[in-house]
């Protein structure tokens, strides 16, 4: 069983993914982290040196490779499902979950964390607001294809994970994790 988290930058994919994997006793994979480790370069620097197209090509390659693993939670980058038919691959590989947040919340979060994100690092807060508006609409075409869509506004990651785990267990998608 694989659980694949998708959603806009700063929607909580990594934070929630780590807690979820821990709770399920699954391995956790973060495509951005794998990218930086594998190519020994920060995503910011990679974009600067080689551009977005090359990034998307390698991101696709790493996603395909990672989705060969089983019993894992995979956290994608914000753009991952929107290129190379990745959303199809994601849906064929496991339980995809779109972590949905309203634009306002994304804006507040991204104002504080835009430095490490090459696509928005140079934007003023006003431009950032426009960027989110334009791109969220475009990207939701892909995000909304997830098997499960969850509104994560105001939800604490820990309690979210408890609910999600219950939901998955009820539907027999994962076996309850028994402590030894
Ligand atoms: C991107 C999101 C980033 C990272 C890269 C591109 C995007 O991941 O993959 O900067 O296109 O939205 P996070 O969603 O973890 O910020």
Image (cartoon, grey):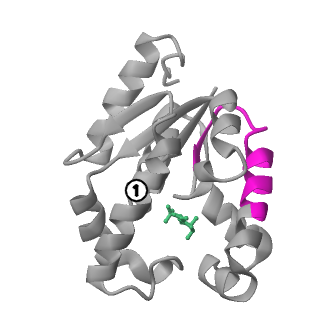
Residue 130 % position (x, y): 32, 72
Q: Residue at x 31, y 38 (%)?
A: 160
Q: Quadrant of residue 11?
A: bottom left
Position of residue 103 relative to residue 157, above or below, is below
> Is residue 177 or residue 73 the one in the foreground?
73
Position of residue 8 relative to residue 155, above or below, is below
Q: Quadrant of the N terminus?
A: top right
Q: Quadrant of residue 9?
A: bottom left
Dot 1 alpha-carbon crowd within 10 angstroms: few under 14, some 14 to 19, many 20 or more: some
The reply to whether the magenta stretch includes residue 165 is no
Q: Is residue 84 left or right of residue 121?
A: right
> Is residue 174 or residue 115 the one in the foreground?
115
Position of residue 96 relative to residue 30, above or below, is above
Q: Which residue is drawn at 80% across and 55% down?
A: 61
Q: Residue at x 41, y 26 (%)?
A: 165
Q: Is mark 1 on a helix, strand or loop?
A: helix
The magenta span reads 57-75
Confirm whether residue 86 shows in the render: yes
Which residue was labeled with disc 1?
136
Query: Ligand 1 lies in which image quarter?
Result: bottom right
Residue 134 % position (x, y): 39, 63
Q: Which residue is drawn at 73% across and 88% down?
A: 49
């Amino acid at each position: 069983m694989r659980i694949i988290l998708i959603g806009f930058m700063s929607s909580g994919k990594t934070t929630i993914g780590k807690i979820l994997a821990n709770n399920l006793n699954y391995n956790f994979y973060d495509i951005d982290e794998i990218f930086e480790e594998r190519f020994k370069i920060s995503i910011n620097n990679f974009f600067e040196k080689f551009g977005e197209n090359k990034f998307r090509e390698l991101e696709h390659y790493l996603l395909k490779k990672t989705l060969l693993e089983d019993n894992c939670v995979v956290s994608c980058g914000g753009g991952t499902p929107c290129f190379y038919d990745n959303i199809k691959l994601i849906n064929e590989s496991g339980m995809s979950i779109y972590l949905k947040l309203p634009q306002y919340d994304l804006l507040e979060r991204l104002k504080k964390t835009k430095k490490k994100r090459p696509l928005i690092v140079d934007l003023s807060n006003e431009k950032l607001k426009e960027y989110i508006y334009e791109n969220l609409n475009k990207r939701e075409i892909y995000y909304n294809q997830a098997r499960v869509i969850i509104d994560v506004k105001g939800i604490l990651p820990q309690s979210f994970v408890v609910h999600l785990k219950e939901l998955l267990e009820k539907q027999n998608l994962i076996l309850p994790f028994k402590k030894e």
